Amino acid sequence: MAIDYHQLKQWEIPEQVTRYREDDCIRYALSLGIASDPMDAADLRYVHERDTLVVPTFLATLGAPGAWASDPGTGIDWMRILHGEHRMRFHAPLPASGSVRSRTRVSHVVDKGAGKGALVVTQRTVTDADSGVPLATVDHVSFCRADGGFANPGQPADAPLDALPAVPGGQPDMRLEMPTRADAALLYRLNGDRNPIHILPAAAREAGFERPILHGLCTYGMAARAVLRQACGGAPSRLASLAARFSSPVVPGETLRADLWRVADQVRFQLVAVERDAVVLSHGVADLRHE
């Protein structure tokens, strides 16, 4: 069954209201490796229950629409989807406990051509469920490898999102090395993503991996960790947006090195798996606020 552009653009994704507590924020921070040095006072602010700071990308785990594209009616070959890019814009700091409302729609359906796949973008708006205050806008770009070539005179296609910029050349202005634990995926999955390729060796092999891999959004969250630490003075309120492209899976236990460049009010970045010298997160860009 091929993608039907009109049907997919009108696909109804249920609204979600999600309540969370300080323990959820702390677990998320720990799953990113924050406070792996328990004597690091700056990191302890994210994992202590008093005046807890919240990593803004925690919102990636709250109210996500789940496996909606696995419905055969979407026309998407669910087993061949890859998470291509993730873009988040933060409108207000997230308190350490509360309730959020998530509304998700399909914003873009892009035909890359027969044999080249398609891009499907969902946009999720997140607000405080009680006050209605906007908290974040999330663009999730899925690369549907088997679904290109659907466009024809009766089936239009959207233009893609503006391309993310490549990192500058030369030596980065800042670097941060972040070891990951061998059981990092087992910890991160407690944030809600229970995909078996992150825990079961047989499921990972069936998907084409030698062993279970780390969640892409864990790698993304670790990029936020690096930007907060190196460019925001540890202040989550200074991070206005974070966007990046997933380039290669991460094997739990690898060391991730964040390379960061300052470009005006932005930070451009990439994450590299040190042991393989492989870029795993590319085209990273973060907008910063002045305080």
Image (cartoon, grey):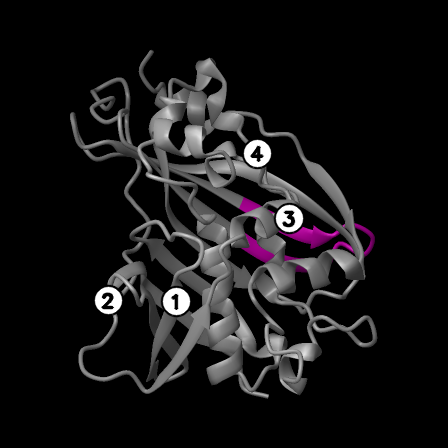
Q: Are marks 1 and 4 in contact (CB under 8 Å)?
A: no
Kind of element beneath mark 4: loop
Residue type pointed to by label 2: Ala
- Alpha carbons under labels 2 and 1: distance apart: 19 Å
Q: Residue at horizontal 43%, vertical 28%?
A: 202
Residue that label 2 marks: 166
Left or right, residue 104 beside residue 120: right
Whether residue 158 is situated above or below residue 22 in the rendered picture: above
Q: Is residue 131 magenta?
A: yes
Rendered view: 216 above or below 28 = above
**Badge number at residue 150:** none
User: Which residue extends farthest top?
Assistant: 1
From the image, tell me which residue sits under label 4. Answer: 66
Spatial distance from mark 2 to mark 3, Cα to Cα? 30 Å
Residue 223 found in image quarter? bottom left
Identity of the residue drawn at 53% across and 29% down = 67
Disc nearer the start of the sequence (1/4): 4
- Relative placement, left or right, of 153 versus 209 is left
Q: Please name the amino acid that badge 3 sits on.
A: Asn
Packing grade of label 2 (10 A; few <14, some 14-19, many >=20) is some
Q: Residues within 10 Å of mark 3 (few under 14, many from 20)?
A: some
Q: Looking at the picture, how far across and down is residue 81, in whole percent?
A: 36, 32
Question: Magenta includes 61?
Answer: no
Frontmost of labels 2 and 1 is 1
